[in-house]
Amino acid sequence: MKTAPLALFDSVRGCPKEIPHNEKLLSLKYESLDYDNSENQLFLEEERRMSFLGFKCLEISRWVICGLIGFLTGLIACCIDIAVENLAGLKYYVVKQNIEKFTEVGGLSISLILWAVLNSAFVMVGAVIVAFFEPGAAGSGIPQIKCYLNGVKIPRVVRLKTLVVKVCGVICSVAGGLAVGKEGPMIHSGAVVAAGVSQGRSTSLKKDFKIFEYFRRDTEKRDFVSAGAAAGVSAAFGAPVGGVLFSLEEGASFWNQMLTWRIFFASMISTFTLNFFLSIYNNKPGDLSSPGLINFGRFESDSVAYNLYEIPLFIVMGAAGGLLGALFNTLNYWLTIFRIRYVHRPCLQVMEAMLVAAVTATVSFAMIYFSNDCQPLGPDQSEDYPLQVHTHTHTHTHTRPLSLIPTLTLNPLDIVFDLVGGTNKMSPVGHIFVCLLFLWELLLFCADGEYNSMATAFFNTPERSVRSLFHNPPGSYNPLTLSLFTLTYFFLACWTYGLTVSAGVFIPSLLIGAAWGRLFGILLAVWAVPGKYALMGAAAQLGGIVRMTLSLTVIMVEATGNVTYGLPIMLVLLTAKIVGDYFVEGLYDIHIKLQSVPFLHLEAPATSHWLTAREVMGAPVTCFNRIEKVGTIVDVLSNTSTNHNGFPVVVPVAICGLILRSQLIVLLKHKVFVELARSRLTQRKLQLKDFRDAYPRFPPIQSIHVSQDERECMMDLTEFMNPTPYTVPQETSLPRVFKLFRALGLRHLVVVDSENRVVGLVTRKDLARYHLGKHGLEEMQLAQT
Amino acid sequence: MKTAPLALFDSVRGCPKEIPHNEKLLSLKYESLDYDNSENQLFLEEERRMSFLGFKCLEISRWVICGLIGFLTGLIACCIDIAVENLAGLKYYVVKQNIEKFTEVGGLSISLILWAVLNSAFVMVGAVIVAFFEPGAAGSGIPQIKCYLNGVKIPRVVRLKTLVVKVCGVICSVAGGLAVGKEGPMIHSGAVVAAGVSQGRSTSLKKDFKIFEYFRRDTEKRDFVSAGAAAGVSAAFGAPVGGVLFSLEEGASFWNQMLTWRIFFASMISTFTLNFFLSIYNNKPGDLSSPGLINFGRFESDSVAYNLYEIPLFIVMGAAGGLLGALFNTLNYWLTIFRIRYVHRPCLQVMEAMLVAAVTATVSFAMIYFSNDCQPLGPDQSEDYPLQVHTHTHTHTHTRPLSLIPTLTLNPLDIVFDLVGGTNKMSPVGHIFVCLLFLWELLLFCADGEYNSMATAFFNTPERSVRSLFHNPPGSYNPLTLSLFTLTYFFLACWTYGLTVSAGVFIPSLLIGAAWGRLFGILLAVWAVPGKYALMGAAAQLGGIVRMTLSLTVIMVEATGNVTYGLPIMLVLLTAKIVGDYFVEGLYDIHIKLQSVPFLHLEAPATSHWLTAREVMGAPVTCFNRIEKVGTIVDVLSNTSTNHNGFPVVVPVAICGLILRSQLIVLLKHKVFVELARSRLTQRKLQLKDFRDAYPRFPPIQSIHVSQDERECMMDLTEFMNPTPYTVPQETSLPRVFKLFRALGLRHLVVVDSENRVVGLVTRKDLARYHLGKHGLEEMQLAQT
């Protein structure tokens, strides 16, 4: 051992323990992926042994795996879709029965309670499995996948258990009527599928198929995960190109072209599989014309798509979306802080989720009752009827329209009586909401033969509501309805995101945006194609919240199936991003920061040319000799403060290699000691397979027993270290270091002086620390939590 | 100077001079782009002086430039389109007049001759300007742009003159009726526009606008050129996402995300501009619903798009496309070799182009006359009438149907007499063709009220023919017509590509493929949607020729406007690529290889782990001291055998920097000598601006006069060298070196030993030399030509 254990983290010693989540801190608990191949002798020998045919076979396996990933992701999407549809159908059926039964005896509040209880029950199941079994499955999963693709190892994010909980959880939360989408979780699901399939084994199930062993390392696994994420996007939105671009946007640094093709292939297979199975489910086997889980419906391009003078309007909408998105994110940020502080016990989390479900049901119910927006019920509008079951093809919906609307035309005083003075069995919050709404709005109800347009907006599945807002003819919605709906749904969605349930934010955002976009379109009565403005509003709102541009544009274009809207959608998204970024970061980035993840952004901060590798590197660095004493190695590995996870290997002065903690652990476990090799001549030589078998859950150092005698042995690292680690001189500027890091997906970058002596080590945290704040370049602190 | 001039090129001394073009050679005349920033003191000082606002301004300029690039590219596309339409209209008008005048007097051969002469005249103009003024404008330009994006400086490829000749040339060759498309040249045009606009000056016009000076270096310029290429694709195919992916596929190594967004923006603006101006031209101002230069028409997705059992058929078509593409490429390869050997004088080249034009006209004419495929002329098919003027919108074509068909129903013996025994004024090749066709086919003509489907396929602009093949109802074409057409057009297109005219191969490939695809569809009469098979055939043929996959899939999907066909198109393109690659490379790669361009492929050859930096590097390397004698520098720069164009700077033992030839030239020109600085205290300090002003045409060393006294002066390189060049140890494997090179877009990579002493230098040629041949890894030779 060359130097004392590093003192890099001195600065954080004084950091108060009681603030575990703070966006000014970087957590040290997250490790990086080893995306850079350790080209040690074992590896090179294996590569050199392999024939050209061997490489071809590997390449074919990669394609096969990507095909499998796409297939399984599509299948999961299909299952989620069918499960949600049937559960929701069942729920609607029960409620309808109840309404019909109790309407006559004045018990509409009973129906409301039943409704709320059913929703809460679904959500409870979803929240319980997430909170108690696998907290990693909470939320949309997109922040976690972003981090993973960025190169951060988020614990448990690609486990089989996470997948199961995620899938069941999202079914429950969507069926439970929360203001959530099932699209975000699809991306996470795709990623988990990819991580599982590509390894040819399941560590959770303790099942090893003995295939794809070559791919058992971070480099290959991460590549497949990016394909899985793309397949997820593709299945969710029917947007294979959008999926590819999503993966590129998030995992841009390590891009290569063959990989992109495979990602595209996985995406294609995924949307194809979904189509195929849904076509069977819809009794049109073999018809592959329907795209992903959500479909915005076709915007016909026969008519004039848009005019030049509309572009400024779209940009204004983009700005509005940016503002609203920033508001959404800020509110959600406060809420998340609140949750981190006070709602961290699982049972509390479950209760909050149930509360939100009950409130959502109550508010929806109340909004419909107290809405005065009655529209004549035309014969062609029957498909916009609320409460019908959502199916996928426009033409062949086996709808079961429930005759709820006529039952709504009751004497409101019944309900008011029920609610205010009545049985009092409903939740108090729902109570208050309903009362407030009651006071606030005039009590107007619809006559027979009319329908309630608020119900159209509120009581559909969110996907269907979005489509209605895009495509219903002008005049379908009353501005007041839309404003009310926007307002309510905005706060509901904001409250919902971050609950301990598995749920996405894409669809709610689209819905909010479509509502106010359509409102905007109606107010511009002259130009009178409100559906177009609904589309732009949806894009603006979603862009304002998540701040994606390129991939989101393509996803929106693919989901609408009309290339012509590409430019306005792009302008809207860009404006939304610029305006939103002025106030606050994107929703996913906020959540990533709150987790203190050392996330590497696209480029080094603009004004960071002042800094050089010398200033940012961690020093001094623990180095090993080429032949090192076992005791020293064990001591270093046991010392938790030396958590670079990589150690330069030196010959007297100069660097000659780099060895990873995980490699050392495997060496210690197999007792690859010089003395033992001499004494036991028959000992099997350590192979790459041994490292692959231990991947990815390398045992902790504590579990490896090293006797006092063995501590005196020596270990020869020559064969196992990476003999050609990337190095930079101390004078290298931060942007240059950053670029090298990003372009090659490095984990460790050794800083050397002019004689090739190790002077420091740059890791992800050293680079992620710097960011542009209000007062120029700021440095975050590092925390062990 | 440390070592003797390098002896790297000994191996090529024996290479015979008389084979200048050989795919087993790598030419040394091509230099690499300096994509890696030289982060010398001047640069760092400038960056450090710049405020955050300054960086913001730069970023905004980049967006503005990309907008401009998109706008100008769209405008050029619009001009080309309108010019072609009007010139072709004029030509058709003249020929029609002539036919009407001479038909009665039995002089149809005169019409044929007029036709051929007119075509040849157009082509002559196009060929003359290319052959005599700017040979760099020949062909589609895609190979050149591929090379540029790959990092190779192709001389004159992004000059203004090239642009002008390219645009005029493509107008002439398309109007001249050659089997060419105007889409490929659009990509080149976009790239030139980008290179021009981004520099804020024109070296050709000697006009400096004093703007965008910051962008005067290879790094920035190349980024903008990739945006320009994308804008070109976008304008050509109405495929902005396809454009982005094209740029990524070709310039993948240096990708970053902000750049991708800007590329996407340029693409969007480009297709938007084209739409906007074409909408004005078509008297529908403000209607932005029509996409790029070519539009495949909408494949309706209301009906069943395709069935599962059709996928194997598509794959078979892909394989066929791969085979036919390989045949096309092989034939064209032989033809190109022939041209290089025997047709290298400009006047010969012009004559060949004229010959091809005449033959194309004659063959087309003859095919129509001798075709027996008469179809009833329905009222709705009048738009498929031959010889009408191509316009852009489906609905508002201001067609001028010419009544050619009735004139075709003449006594064929008239023509035969004219041709065989008659005036003999036509070109002999055309003569032979017509006679052969005459003997081969039965002489059947169409009655009044019928139309000739061969004419539909042959006498339209190729774009329109493609659309007819995709969308005409089943039964529009007779299988014999299609086979004949495929056969003829295949050879015509093959002969045409590589002529000294400005022309692309996309549209001819699509047309050939659409023809045999439709034929295939007709033969599978049971499934009976031949248009779909035409689309797959077009994809297969194009994929078999150019071997693009991802970007081509997206381009095809965007041009058809139907996402559903994505998977089959992708499968077809993949199959075509796999099958085609088994036989011969893609057309563009063949032409790149024939130019001996050191093109870096995506990855190092699979079995190259045997090689290390030590084996591939050039050694010994010419190094300079930090303070070096001017005479030494001048001598080294004058010695043409030291053409690494970059020189490591060393302090006694270890490397301390890298300086480029171009930097040294500027230093010599400004006489930045230590002694002069001492004597003339007022001398202005050299700034980055001086380097930028000299960029990109640095003067040759011969033009810089250095007196004998000055030769004894010293030059201090400290401030100007890049103090942190990338280095690797000698043991680094070739794949690792390759990856570093590609990922960072390097030009020089210094190989050092364990004490940081320079032992070699790896450049592009050292890596491009290795490729996988029939017998494993092969090494190409280097040639000075």
Image (cartoon, coloured by chain):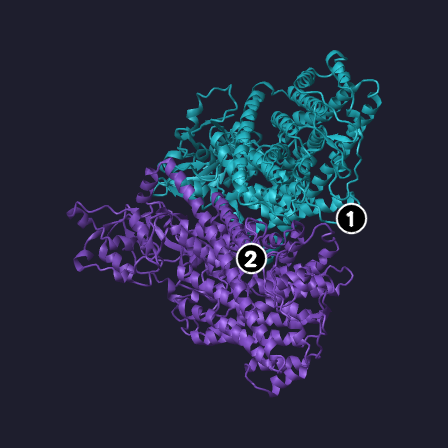
Chain colours: A cyan, B purple
Of residues B482 and B722, the one nearer the viewer is B482
Looking at numbered disc 1 in the image, what kind of residue is underneath it? Pro
Asked if B194 appears above or below B438 in the picture, the reply is above
Query: Residue A620, image x and y in percent?
Result: 39, 33
Q: Circle 1 — which element?
A: loop
User: Which residue has dot 2 on it?
Assistant: B293
Label 1, residues with CA under 10 Å away: few <14, some 14-19, many ≥20: some
> Disc 1 to disc 2, how far (Cα)?
37 Å
Q: Which mark is residue A285?
A: 1
The location of residue B467, given as percent across then percent down, is: 64, 60
Q: Is residue A460 above or below residue B633?
A: above
Which chain is home to disc 2?
B
Q: Is residue A556 left or right of residue B605?
A: right
**In the picture, residue A100 is in which quadrant?**
top right
Residue placed most toward the observer, A623 or B253: B253
Q: Local crowd at mark 2 within 10 Å, few (<14), some, or many (≥20)? A: many
